[in-house]
Amino acid sequence: AQKITQTQPGMFVQEKEAVTLDCTYDTSDPSYGLFWYKQPSSGEMIFLIYQGSYDQQNATEGRYSLNFQKARKSANLVISASQLGDSAMYFCAHIGRGSTLGRLYFGRGTQLTVWP
Amino acid sequence: GAVVSQHPSRVICKSGTSVKIECRSLDFQATTMFWYRQFPKQSLMLMATSNEGSKATYEQGVEKDKFLINHASLTLSTLTVTSAHPEDSSFYICSAWTGQSTGELFFGEGSRLTVL
């Protein structure tokens, strides 16, 4: 079974600073993917970034980058130059491509607060 | 714009009634959609995998007779909460693959159900 662990229930960062949100995972799937989603108070799930387990390079999307360390089974999200609008809940999720038929499993989330 | 549309966004109903939530994929066909449930300040929990033209696959502990899922076409999946009770009050979110190799999985806007 997949397990996603986000150990930081809350994080605070000053505007324009960088912040790292931690995520570790445990899976038996030989091939898998890792996602990060942002959920503002409105509830919608906003896709941020995706990393495939066999991708050679760490994923980047604008101010978001994923620090993927496969051997350590970690997939931390780095947000550079934080903005006030980044304040939201952030979820790490795992998707298996084998027997799990592509279902997504989420961590508990990290509430990020950006202060001016 | 959103690639997955969910309706209604909010619904309030009396205990004992049934509520239907629709999930539509826009601009793409989704043979598989997923339904999640999220309690306040908690993570998303996968309820079931909705398969076009066949029965849904439910996660362990999810009552299939309580949460009826129908995937009648390649662009529409519906979740019906039957005989709803206050404990069914929650945020329900659907998702679907676009089929792109980048692994993007898009979510609907979510439906907040309140059972009185």
Image (spheres, coloured by chain):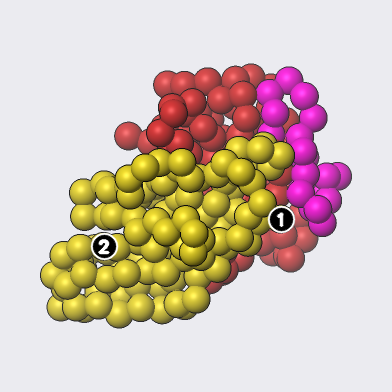
Dominant secondary-structure state across the stretch colored magenta: loop
The magenta segment is B50-68
Front one among B12 and A44: A44
Residue A81: assigned label = none
Q: x%, y% of residue B65? A: 86, 44
Secondary structure, mark 2, is strand
**Among numbered discs 2 and 1, the one appearing first in the sequence:** 1
Q: Amino acid at mark 1?
A: Ala
- Chain ID, mark 2: A
Viewer-side label of 2, 1 = 1
Front one among A16 and B15: A16
Q: Residues within 10 Å of mark 1 (few under 14, many from 20)?
A: few
Q: x%, y% of residue A34? A: 48, 50
Give the residue pinned by disc 2: A79
Q: Is residue B12 visible?
A: no
Task: Name the outermost residue toward the front.
Answer: A71
Chain identity for the colour red used in the image:
B
- Chain ID, mark 1: A
Residue A1: assigned label = 1
Per the model, the C-alpha gap separating discs 2 and 1 is 29 Å
Q: Is residue B54 part of the magenta span, yes or no?
A: yes
The shade of chain A is: yellow
Front one among A76 and B94: A76
**Image quadrant assignment for residue B3:** top left
Q: Amino acid at mark 2?
A: Ile
Q: Residues within 10 Å of mark 2 (few under 14, many from 20)?
A: many
Q: Is residue A50 above or below residue B1?
A: below
Q: x%, y% of residue A107? A: 55, 63
